[in-house]
Amino acid sequence: MVIQVIAIRAFSILSGNTLFSLSCVVTSFMLGFSAGSFSVEKLLAWRSSFLIRRSLLFYGLAELGVGLFALLVLPLLFSQQLELIRAGLQLSDLLGPAGGNLLFALAILVLPTALMGAALPLIALRLPAREDIGWLYGSNLLGAAVGALAASFVLISTLGCNGAAGVVMLLNGAICICSIVLHRRLKASPKSASIIEAPGSGSDIKGGPLPRPLLYVLAFSSGVLFLAAEVLWTRLLSLILGNRVYVTSVTLCLLMLCLAGGAVLARWLSRRIGPLKIILGSYLAALLFILVGLWLKTPALAAMVSSPEASPAQRLGGPILLVVVSTVLPALLMATAMPTILMTPPEGSIAKGELIGKLLGINTLGSVLGALFSSYLLLHYVGTDGAWILLAALIVLMGFTVIWIAEDRKLDRMLAPILAPTALFLVLSASNFLGEFQSPYFSKEEVVVFSDDEHGVFQVIKDGKALRVYNNSTELVFDFGNRRTQYVQEMLARLPMLFATRATKVLDIGTGYGITAGAFSSYPQLEQIDTVEIVPAMIDNAHLFATGNRRYFENPQVKVHQADGRHFLVRAKTRYDVISVNVSDPYLPGSASHFSKEFYALVRSRLGPQGVFCQHLFGPDVAALVHGIARQFPHVRAVKSYANGLVVLASMEPLEPPEGDAIKPIADLVSQLDVYQPELFTQKLQEGDIEIASILQEEPQFINTDAHPVLEFRTAAGRLDLWSSNH
């Protein structure tokens, strides 16, 4: 799990910080897991006695291989990122974005993930009885939960990605040594023969064996449904916690704990009722909680934006109840399925460990389909609530399919009366969710735009004369309509253009409201204005902010690109005279990568002679960010923006403003917005110089890099605030 967290972080840079990049990485992991599981099953069919006797040895070697990948390959994903990004872009040009990104991720991840996928089936061959796979499966998932938490909360934040990879190597090396020692001891033990024989009698599992086709269907369905639900659970938690670095790890940890708990629950239930009753009963109970959660969602999330005078219990009680009802309980119940399937013997004679690898592989393939189905189809076409309704319908469909395949009349009589009215209820409930306006926080009167798709829950909210933009629960930009917002974002164009008097080509990263792009469009000498925005809804709704952005989207000078800013820079062949970055939140995953040492080096390489770089910095870590820029550019100046921010200029050449009318656009701006008197601009620039000089006299508290993204883990001491930074 630590490797997966690091890989997701690395590929967010290599393939872009988008849902599609994340999906390709997760899909690559799942396909690798599946390949490893199927490989063990094939080897077992070919040389079962040889493999069983040496399963611990092979398990140790597999863990060593994974550790070597972490130590030798993961650091290269950061240090060689430019070459890797170019290779990935070439594949995308050849095969399309989806095919290129997937093949790119598979080429790097398939070998280590196949070794990971082989590990559990290999160690399962040493279990004394088949039903003990439940304990092994649960223990493995508990370890994954610990790894998910440790990755973000301890390892990456403290040691960086490369240090965390080194820890993985040490742990996997220790596992390898222990496995080899244990293998030698069991090999020398006279009792070892009984361990490698086929499972003995005396199983306390309730119910008889099941047909192999039915086990395959159940394993595949379990993977599809759980991963489809996991995508939606992650969306729900991001609505509550925001798009912050800890959300991914908290979500993974929570779901891994539920999976581990499900394995324990499955072992307990298997002694009392048959496997089909466990699986179908658990899914139907999970379905009930999911439907209750749908009705709870809007009032629970609305409580989070209640009046500031509300107590923490009043604000957080509803969301906590929502998480328990719609995530924890359904995940725990659905997690009983796969351990139950693994513990259930197939009909006919079986060898030790037979079908475990195949069932795990089939389950993993189902997981791939479920994740892609939920991300690319359900969320895109019907939104979050509609996706839950359709997922519930899939659970009902699975129930009918299992009843049909099992040909168990007793099961028919028990479950058919439950499934039929449930299906009718879903049809009637769909009208309340599919296509219906459902803001999770605000009333219809406040919401100007609401969209719910694979990119998140996007909302534009009207607050008096101001507009606010949210993606999930994170406010993307400061209020539109506030004069300070207009001033800061226009200055991101006006200030660099003051120094780059001969500029003809400019790049604006982070279009947002379009204020900066609009300001650039007011300079007739500019021949090329590229503006890049990663959130499609910001581009689609640019007309809402036309009073401040000069309708840049209708200007033939301006070319709008929906893309990841870093990727656009890597691909760009143009040498720009000005590169302006308006990615304001330095603590947001994805955004934080625009404040790293590697990003500033990339910007420098894309500037032409006498080119000027401009970026808005704000927050308690401005000093460290200024040091990061100054390490790449010898000449740095700044003007104050908000109370805790700076509009920073940087160049390889001295930044001396021209005299005469060149300052007029800035004078007109500050006069129009009444920010300060126009004649004070020179004084403001001098005050900025003094602040920059003061900052650079001190040693930086940290330098943010891609491999050690300190910014994303920063918090403000003594603050507890779900709505900003990581407080």
Image (cartoon, grey):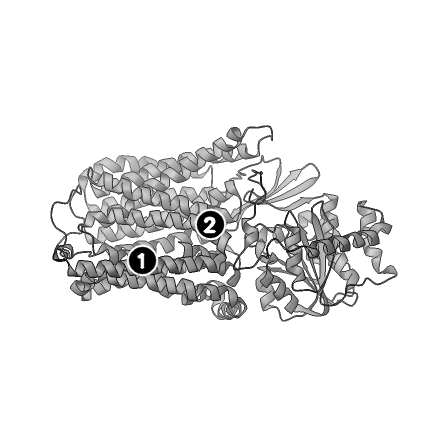
Residue beneath disc 1: 175
Q: Residue at x 23, y 54 (%)?
A: 124
In the visual, does 45 lie left or right of 112?
A: left
Q: Is residue 104 visible?
A: yes
What x and y, as percent, mark residue 634? 70, 65
In the visual, does 281 lie left or right of 719?
A: left
Q: Is residue 35 visible?
A: no
What x and y, as percent, mark residue 664? 84, 56
View extreme (front): residue: 698
Under mark 2, the amino acid is Val
Q: Is 288 in front, or is 619?
A: 619
> Secondary structure under badge 1?
helix
> Secondary structure under badge 2?
helix
Please identify the quarter of the rendering in which residue 682 is found.
bottom right
- Of the image marks 1 and 2, the number of the one nearer the N terminus: 2
What x and y, as percent, mark residue 659? 87, 62
Please identify the quarter of the rendering in which residue 55 is found.
bottom left
Under mark 1, the amino acid is Ile
Look at the image and tell me in which quarter the C terminus lies: top right
In the visual, does 501 lie left or right of 222?
A: right
Please identify the quarter of the rendering in which residue 654 is found.
bottom right
Q: Residue at x 21, y 39 (%)?
A: 411
What x and y, as percent, mark residue 497? 77, 61
Q: Residue at x 42, y 50 (%)?
A: 148
On screen, residue 306 above or below 43: above
Q: CA distance from mark 1 to mark 2?
A: 21 Å
Q: Is 79 in front, or is 400?
A: 79
Look at the image and tell me in which quarter the N terminus lies: bottom left
Residue beneath disc 2: 154
